Image (cartoon, rainbow, N blue to C red):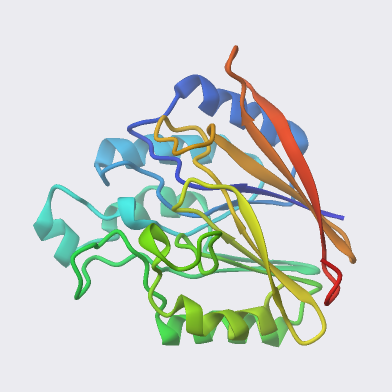
Amino acid sequence: MTKLFQIADLHFGAEDRDLVDAFVDLCNASRPDAVIAAGDFTQSGRKSEFDAAARFLGRLDPPVVGIPGNHDVPSRALHRRFTTPWRRYERSVGRHMASSLEDGALHIEGLRTARRAQWQPDWSLGRIGRPSLGRALDLLAERDADLRVLTCHHPILAPGGNRGRARTARAGTSVTTIAEHCDLVLTGHLHETFALPAEGPSHTCWFVGAGTTFSRRTRGEPAGFNVLDISADTIRVTHHIADEDRPAFIVRDSRVLPRREGQY
């Protein structure tokens, strides 16, 4: 059995500090095989926010795999955004985690979908780069692990389809290829928890979104995160949310996802 913690949209600069402490305690006590952080560590890409995010990551005992989100590009200093968009990220949180992990039967690869700028007005939207996706999927195929996980910030499948904030460029044309090579795709950005299937050659690939873990920037659901317990046949997704009465997390619901083709 493999246990993963899926967190996203931490938004340091708008965090609930008591919930940060509660998450650290729960995570370290649960001893997952890995924590997957699907982007947006900061609110505005400020140095102070990255420093706070780095301190948080340094308190976690399990290995962390993470990738940046659109909020991790400096939003107020355009010269930094265009010339050194990831410098603060790489010098702070990047030192406390990896963009990939291979540990026995588990293989995780990160894919960057956030961009410094785009040829369209909404720079918060994601974009899948064909070369970077190809490299990530090639690595997953070469190792042929029992559990192949891809993580990116922006959704590739979303409950309402690829519309609005879920308009990730090239997502629709990438789903089939991703499903062929992956068992799990873990994303953030929408601040919404969901699990959607896509069929692979002989398995079901699940696209799982997480809410904002402990920030005050909630959208329709409380702050929270996912715990995934994975066996050869199933993936149990347990959704934890912030308690209304105290700085702690409680289980909201749990769902079992079949890994075999056509069983959902």
Residue at 58 percent across and 17 percent down: it is: 244
Quarter of the image that includes the C terminus: bottom right
- Image quadrant assignment for residue 143: bottom right
**Residue 144 drawn at (x, y percent):** 76, 82
Q: Foreground: 202 or 146?
A: 202
Q: Is residue 194 above or below residue 155?
A: above
Q: Is residue 163 above or below residue 203?
A: above
**Residue 36 drawn at (x, y percent):** 59, 53
Q: Point out the residue furthest to the left here.
A: 79
Q: Is residue 107 above or below residue 63?
A: below
- Image quadrant assignment for residue 184: bottom right
**Residue 180 drawn at (x, y percent):** 68, 84
Q: Foreground: 92 or 115?
A: 115
**Residue 177 drawn at (x, y percent):** 60, 86
Instruction: Decide if residue 164 is on the left or right side of residue 87.
Output: right
Instruction: Decide if residue 173 is on the left or right side of residue 3.
Output: left
The tally of labels here is 0
Q: Is residue 51 above or below residue 261?
A: above
Instruction: Decide if residue 10 is on the left or right side of residue 148.
Output: left
- Image quadrant assignment for residue 114: bottom left
Residue at 32 percent across and 33 percent down: it is: 13
Q: Point out the residue furthest to the front here.
A: 160
Quarter of the image that includes the N terminus: bottom right
